[in-house]
Image: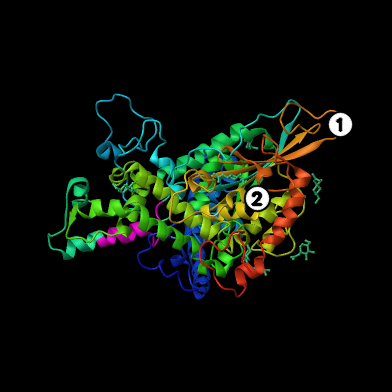
């Protein structure tokens, strides 16, 4: 196991995205885990045999043959393990990559204190309107104008899902005669508890320690009075209730948008990783898309998310150099020490018996989002001014840009595997080579990497999706961000790109003829069928012509001709320099020197 990043082990003000390097099991643990699982499986087998015999007999007695054979049917190649109930488990021979219960490589799964909004709600009691959404985001924020957007829309990767504000072009409907023939989606999981080792947990411990050791000297006043009774009680890593809703809603939305791309006589393969929140995000999405009987319609493939394993949906797991990258963390720290000066002075004057630092201010802002998605409401939110929330969002943009996007030497490399998979599906071939972190065992086989679907649904993480956009060469997100001053509206905005429940939908559109770039109709003359690629990120178009010279930059709809797109992607694939970027021996440059998502020479 490589050493954790210097700031990841103790009080980490900035680390805290989806990846938790502290938490990676060391290599020998895998072996032990393997052994443990074998033994547990045996135990489960024996136990369930004992249980299933009488239960099965009872069922057979009550319902006759049909019930017993359907509740415990013989294994099918595409059987979904989760659906087949514990009593069926031992009799199926589900391969590991289709096994969803019991979970393997699930990651930390501690749950937190339950929400109790009926008691903790603090909305304006003079208003009789009762919001239908659980999260209490209508919080008074100092300095917020009437027309300004909610601070809950500027929390970077901790933003509860909302459609993006757009990426520069308007949305266009399909012209008459054109049809969407395929969609490939990659979705982030939904709202979750903090990763283990995140700054909020450290803040909680620090407060607790101050209360214990200070012997009554700890005292919050004014806006911080609530801290006197406050305790850190969040769980780790797994989806919170809101996270389930985000993915269910996304499934429902996708069923309305793309329902006819599903062939009702088939069962599709959808892919996620083994982590608990990843699996459950996929399951909630499927329930939203197909209904609770979704196991008749989809089989979930779980790709191992563990150090050293190849996984295009968690590309950092096989990219050791990625753990040395600090550019984004450094840039964010510069910015945090800038924009949180006022808040730190203000808040430290409101607490006695505690040394309130800039890092505490940052943790308190982070806590607002985590508590809101976990409990529905958080007292930390109104501690900050509007301008400070703008600053918070920007700190995350700096972090992700420099650690995972074009500002990172492994930005392209980490997203490369998924880029290759999208292209392979478009070109209708499996991947029997390895020049990235794809798992060839899975991708060289149509059983685990099918080519005959019109609907491909994959699930991944925030930073990985940023790297995927980088690997596609979407240079409109490449502009360097200044760590010393907020630039105003800027293209690389994480809350627009990878909020909780984010989704990139790559649509393939078939038109009977070429469509004019200004969308005034079809081109005259030729009758040549033309296909287009349309990138939709959080329900808004990412204009491909802005980034890829092969695509027509004048297209007002942001689409790109499929052939041109594929030609562009051949070039982009090479630019990643996967081997060197992930495994090569090169110097890590300070923030600002890397601008193309790959190592500088
Ligand atoms: C799911 O599969 C079942 C069984 O084949 C089918 O009856 C149902 O229509 C499918 N659901 C959808 C939403 O297509
Ligand atoms: C590839 O996936 C298979 C099936 O899950 C797994 O057994 C194997 O260890 C994986 N290989 C790597 C290098 O990740
Ligand atoms: C900090 O306070 C100064 C002086 O009141 C003000 O000009 C500045 O905008 C504040 N900065 C932030 C980030 O709120
Ligand atoms: C894709 O390739 C398979 C064979 O691997 C073939 O059966 C299928 O028709 C091809 N599909 C398209 C759209 O070309
Ligand atoms: C991919 O699969 C094909 C046929 O199934 C096989 O011949 C080839 O060796 C495989 N390649 C790799 C790298 O596993
Ligand atoms: C995993 O990725 C490495 C490159 O990092 C490659 O050499 C290896 O063949 C891959 N293994 C599988 C099973 O895909
Ligand atoms: C966003 O990206 C486009 C295309 O690269 C560029 O023209 C534009 O200036 C960028 N916008 C901002 C605010 O940086």
The residue shown at (60%, 75%) is 585
Residue bearing the label numbered 2: 78
The residue shown at (39%, 30%) is 132
**Which color mode does the image show?**
rainbow
| Residue 251 in picture, x, y percent from top left | 55, 38
Please state if 46 lies on the left or on the right of 210 as rendered: right
Q: Nearer the viewer, residue 265 or 481?
A: 481
- At mark 2, the secondary structure is loop
Q: Quadrant of residue 507?
A: top right
Find the magenta span and give its range: 193-206
Q: Nearer the viewer, residue 216 or 52?
A: 216
The residue shown at (59%, 53%) is 478
Residue bearing the label numbered 1: 527
Q: How many marks?
A: 2
In the depicted structure, whether residue 126 falls above or below residue 4: above
In the depicted structure, whether residue 318 falls above or below residue 424: below
The quadrant of the picture occupied by the C terminus is bottom right
Q: Is residue 201 magenta?
A: yes
- Answer yes or no: is residue 404 visible: yes
Please state if 276 lies on the left or on the right of 361 as rendered: right
State the mark number for residue 301: none
| Residue 482 in picture, x, y percent from top left | 48, 55
Please state if 373 lies on the left or on the right of 314 as rendered: left
| Residue 84 in picture, x, y percent from top left | 55, 49
Disc on the earlier residue, 1 or 2: 2
In the depicted structure, whether residue 159 falls above or below residue 399: above
Q: Nearer the viewer, mark 1 or mark 2?
A: 1
| Residue 554 in picture, x, y percent from top left | 70, 38
Q: CA distance from mark 1 to mark 2?
A: 42 Å
Q: Is residue 402 magenta?
A: no
């Amino acid at each position: 196991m490589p050493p954790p990043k210097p700031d990841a082990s103790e009080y980490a003000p900035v680390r805290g995205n989806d990846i938790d390097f502290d938490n990676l099991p060391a290599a020998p643990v895998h072996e032990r885990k393997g052994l443990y699982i074998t033994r547990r499986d045996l135990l489960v087998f024996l136990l369930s045999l004992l249980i299933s015999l009488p239960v099965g007999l009872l069922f057979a007695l009550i319902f006759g043959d049909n019930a017993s054979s359907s509740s415990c049917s013989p294994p099918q190649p595409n059987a979904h393990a989760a659906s087949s109930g514990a009593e069926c488990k031992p009799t199926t021979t589900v391969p590991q990559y289709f096994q969803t219960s019991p979970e393997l490589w699930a990651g930390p799964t501690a749950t937190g204190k339950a929400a109790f909004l009926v008691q903790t709600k603090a909305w304006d009691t003079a208003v009789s309107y009762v919001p239908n959404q659980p999260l209490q985001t209508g919080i008074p924020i100092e300095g917020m104008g009437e027309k300004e957007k909610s601070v809950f829309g500027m929390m970077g990767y901790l933003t509860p899902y909302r459609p993006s504000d757009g990426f520069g072009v308007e949305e266009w409907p399909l012209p008459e005669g054109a049809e969407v023939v395929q969609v490939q989606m990659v979705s982030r999981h939904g709202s979750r508890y903090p990763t283990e080792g995140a700054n909020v947990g450290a803040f909680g411990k620090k407060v607790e320690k101050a209360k214990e050791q200070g012997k009554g000297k700890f005292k919050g006043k004014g806006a911080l009075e609530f801290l006197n009774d406050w305790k850190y009680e969040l769980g780790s890593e797994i989806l919170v209730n809101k996270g389930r809703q985000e993915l269910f809603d996304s499934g429902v939305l996708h069923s309305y948008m793309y329902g006819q791309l599903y062939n009702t006589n088939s069962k599709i393969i959808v892919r996620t990783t083994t982590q608990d929140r990843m699996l459950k995000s996929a399951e909630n999405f499927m329930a939203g898309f197909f209904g609770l009987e979704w196991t008749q319609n989809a089989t979930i493939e779980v790709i191992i998310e563990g150090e050293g394993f190849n996984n295009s949906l968690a590309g950092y797991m096989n990219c050791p150099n990625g753990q040395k990258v600090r550019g984004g963390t450094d840039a964010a720290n510069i910015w945090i020490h800038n924009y949180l000066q006022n808040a730190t002075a203000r808040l430290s004057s409101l607490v006695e018996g505690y040394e309130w630092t800039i890092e505490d201010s940052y943790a308190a802002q982070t806590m607002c989002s985590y508590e809101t998605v976990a409990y529905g409401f958080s007292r930390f939110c109104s501690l900050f001014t509007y301008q400070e929330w703008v600053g918070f969002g920007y700190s995350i943009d700096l972090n992700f840009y420099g650690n995972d996007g074009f500002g990172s030497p492994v930005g392209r490399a980490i997203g490369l595997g998924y880029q290759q998979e999208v292209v392979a599906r478009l070109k209708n071939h499996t991947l029997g080579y390895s020049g990235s972190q794809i798992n060839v065992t899975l991708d060289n086989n149509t059983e685990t990497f099918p080519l005959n679907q019109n609907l491909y649904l994959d699930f991944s993480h925030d930073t990985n999706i940023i790297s995927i956009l980088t690997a596609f060469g979407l240079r409109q997100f490449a502009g360097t961000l200044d760590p010393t001053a907020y630039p105003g509206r800027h293209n690389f905005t994480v809350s627009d790109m990878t909020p909780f429940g984010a989704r990139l939908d790559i649509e393939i559109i078939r038109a009977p003829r070429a469509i004019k770039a200004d969308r005034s109709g079809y081109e005259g003359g030729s009758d040549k069928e033309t296909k287009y690629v349309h990138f939709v990120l959080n329900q808004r178009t990412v204009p491909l012509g802005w980034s890829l010279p092969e695509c027509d930059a004048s297209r007002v709809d942001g689409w790109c001709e499929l052939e041109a797109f594929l030609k562009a992607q051949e070039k982009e694939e090479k630019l990643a320099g996967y081997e060197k970027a992930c495994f090569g021996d090169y110097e890590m440059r300070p923030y600002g020197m890397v601008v193309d998502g790959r190592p500088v020479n």
